Image (cartoon, rainbow, N blue to C red):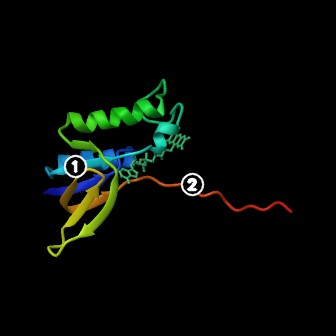
Amino acid sequence: MYDVIIIGAGPAGISAGIYVKRANLKVLILYYGESGIEKASRIENYYGFPEGITGKELYNKGIEQAKKIGIEVKKQEITNIEINSHFLFIVKSNKEQFETKSIIIATGSQKIKPNIIRH
Ligand SMILES: Cc1cc2nc3c(=O)[nH]c(=O)nc-3n(C[C@H](O)[C@H](O)[C@H](O)COP(=O)(O)OP(=O)(O)OC[C@H]3O[C@@H](n4cnc5c(N)ncnc54)[C@H](O)[C@@H]3O)c2cc1C
């Protein structure tokens, strides 16, 4: 049983995980698939990286940092979330299922192309 399950290991998911862990709560981060940040060839607008950093490197460093402070991180695709009769969330992945009191969904966003028509 977890206090918090975070879905997504991009900047939002990992940052949330770090703060949840610092609050002494039991947290699990689940992620699967590409993060938006991995697509960035070079990031030059982040504090503390004067030389810039590749998106992939920053993504992996985030996951590494979470693990280093004792956060459980698993690579599993979330396919379903249910609420049981005790008002607990059942988070189901393609491999396992987990019980948690709360969920943070940090699965990023999809870009929607504007439907601009040229006349
Ligand atoms: C080409 C490109 C260049 C960019 N360049 C910059 C830049 O230079 N500087 C900058 O600040 N920002 C840049 N960005 C924006 C940056 O990538 C996003 O702001 C950032 O990634 C958003 O973080 P996030 O944690 O919300 O989502 P994401 O980073 O997209 O993370 C989503 C997470 O959710 C997980 N996930 C999704 N669905 C599931 C599922 N069903 N089950 C389990 N896990 C799931 C993914 O595996 C991933 O871990 C760029 C974006 C792109 C596309």
Mark 2: C-beta under 8 Å from nearest atom of ligand 1? yes
Residue 116 image position (x, y, % from top left): 74, 61
Q: Is residue 55 left or right of residue 119?
A: left
Q: Earlier in the sequence, mark 1 or mark 2?
A: 1
| Amino acid at circle 2 | Lys
Residue drawn where x is 19% and y is 47% of the image: 21
- Tell whether circle 1 marks a residue whose Cβ is less than 8 angstroms from ligand 1: no
Q: Give the tally of numbered discs.
A: 2
Disc 2 packing (10 Å; few <14; some 14–19; many ≥20)? few
Residue at position x 18%, y 46% in the image? 22
Neighbour tally class for label 1: few under 14, some 14-19, many 20 plus, Cα within 10 Å: many
| Residue drawn at x 32%, y 44% as measured from the top left | 14
Vertical relation: 8 (above or below) 86: above
Percent x, y of residue 82: 27, 68
- In the foreground, 4 or 45: 4
- Name the spot of residue 9 as percent of width and height, x first: 35, 45
Helix, strand or loop at label 1? It is: strand
Q: Quadrant of the N terminus?
A: bottom left
Q: Quadrant of residue 104?
A: bottom left
Q: Which residue is mark 1?
A: 28
Q: Extreme bottom residue here? A: 85
Closer to the camera in the image, 58 or 84: 84
Name the mark on residue 111: 2
The circle drawn on residue 96 is none
Disc 2, SS: loop
Instruction: Report whether 20 appears left or right of 1.
Output: right
Q: Is residue 50 left or right of residue 98?
A: right
**Measured along the vertical axis of the image, is residue 15 above or below residue 47?**
below
